[in-house]
Image (tube, helix red, strand yellow):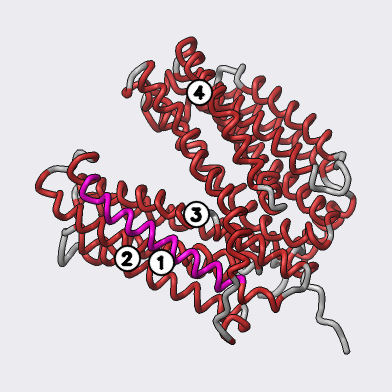
Amino acid sequence: MTSSPDPTPNLTSGRLLARNTIWNLLGLLLPLVVGLVAAPALLRGMGVERVGLLSMAWVIIGYFSLFDLGIGRALTKVVADRLGTREEKSIPPLVWTSLLLMVLLGVFAGLTTWAIGPWLVHRMLKIPEALQTEALHGFYLLATSIPMVTATSGLRGILEAQQRFRVLSFIRIPMSTFSFAGPLLVLPFSHDLVSVIGVLVAGRLIACVAHLWACFHAMPALRQGFALRLSLVHPLLVLGSWMTVSNLVSPIIVYLDRFLIGAVLSVSVGAAYTLPFDMVTRLTIIPGAMAGVLFPAFALSLVKDPDRTALLLRRGVKYLFLIIFPVILAIIVFAPEALRLWLGGTLAASSGGVLRWLAAGVFVNSLAQLPFSLVQSAGRPDIAAKVQLLEFLPYLLAVFLLVKARGIEGAAIAWTVRVTIDAALMFFFACRHLPRRPFFLVKLGASVAAAFVVFYAATLPSSMMLKAGVLMVVTLVFAVAFWFLGFTLEERTFVLRRQRVVDAKAPTLTGTS
């Protein structure tokens, strides 16, 4: 009797992970582009107040969707584990138990949102009296969508564990587009907030059904019977609860500096910090796309081939460094000029240093997303949550003192120092789950230190001509150094071979047409 093929090489192969990273990135970026295009039309059609209410409602619902207690993420890890140990028969009961639990948690979150809706509308939020009835009914509608949101999170986790990111992108892109196009289709008939939200809730239902159909297609065993195992509930809750703690604490830490700037300085000054922060942190979509793909690959390879895990981490960090460093360098070199074009002279004068500090922080924070995913995939989400809880008070004090001493630039310095320490800790804990302490971490530490020296030197030139020259020279030196010191012989050979294939396929300028 022949054994079934080992799924590990297929689900952790470099080409598959690279393709899935691109698909994941497209699924994240294209909806943003659609949102930018649709936003002005929504503002004109619905008015500023209704659009503000809609965005506020999504934020509140998004926060309450954390009531899935991280089970969706935990499900990805556990399904990947079972695939790695070739226990596919145990996956259907695991999936159905998790989905039922997530739906029940979603119902509880929906009922909670329904109950506090009147308080939110009439007391907490400053909503014009003419819109309060619309807003309340809109909140009620959104509350009904929370069980669908939590269930979709679990279904997405199943597909991620199987590296079905192309399918996920095929669902995410049209459904995210519908989130903006749907309200636009309603506007010719009604500007009422309830009608718009009703269309969005219908979209969420369609998305949930699409994810369920994709899961049935990817894993036919799920169609064979509904099975529950109560013994699985406790491990899932333990694993997911720590992920939830991290998801709850992380946004508080992210927005903490903004509240302190408003309290110590003023709300108007905060705009000179918030706008550069929101702009440069958009870059984290790139490492986020890669980390999302590597999370199930880490979980699967850890139980089957930890050496493969170390290789995936090393290559992921290396390629991320290659992509992010030139972008961050360009931002740091031209930060004052870019802000002057975007925001005008007044805000740019006070935000140039802020953007440079934040860009350096984004650089190291991007690298840290991969060991963060590895730690979670190893079944230790408590580590990241405990680190965040421990750093909360010191970070609060650091932001307060630095804002008083150096204004909004002090807040940027505090944020960059925090994420740098956080990155060092994530790499340290990630390596504890690998069979050998990878030497590449020493190399990485030296490379990051060298990058920070280069970032500082890049702030010294004053003329545009000199800045452009520095950027070109440093980028060229970086490319040459990375080619010989960063890439292995195998990787250089692969790149050269691919280049020959491209050259061979390219049309020549001579010859018959």
The quadrant where residue 89 appears: bottom right
Q: Which residue position is annotated with label 1?
A: 148
Q: Which residue position is annotated with label 2?
A: 201
Q: Residue furthest front?
A: 231
Q: In this view, does 188 lie above or below 488?
A: below
Contact between marks 1 and 2 (CB within 8 A): the answer is yes
Q: Which residue position is annotated with label 3?
A: 29
Using the numbered discs, state the Cα–Cα distance from disc 3 to disc 1 in whole angstroms. Answer: 23 Å
Q: Earlier in the sequence, mark 4 or mark 1?
A: 1
Name the chief secondary structure element in magenta.
Answer: helix
Residue type beneath disc 3 = Leu
Q: Residue 81 location, x and y as percent? A: 72, 64
Q: Earlier in the sequence, mark 3 or mark 4?
A: 3
Q: In this view, does 9 lie to the left or right of 80?
A: right
Q: Which of marks 3 and 1 is nearer the N terminus?
A: 3
Residue type beneath disc 1 = Met
Q: In this view, does 164 lie to the left or right of 137?
A: right
Q: In this view, does 119 lie to the left or right of 382?
A: left
Q: What element carries label 4?
A: helix
Residue drawn 65% across and 27% down?
469
Q: Residues within 10 Å of mark 3 (few under 14, many from 20)?
A: some
Give the label on residue 299, or none: none
Q: Which residue position is annotated with label 4?
A: 396
Q: Judge whether residue 345 is colored magenta.
A: no
Q: Is residue 85 above or below residue 444?
A: below
Q: What element carries label 3?
A: helix
Magenta span of residues: 94-119
Q: Residues within 10 Å of mark 4 (few under 14, many from 20)?
A: some
Q: Is residue 272 left or right of residue 159?
A: left
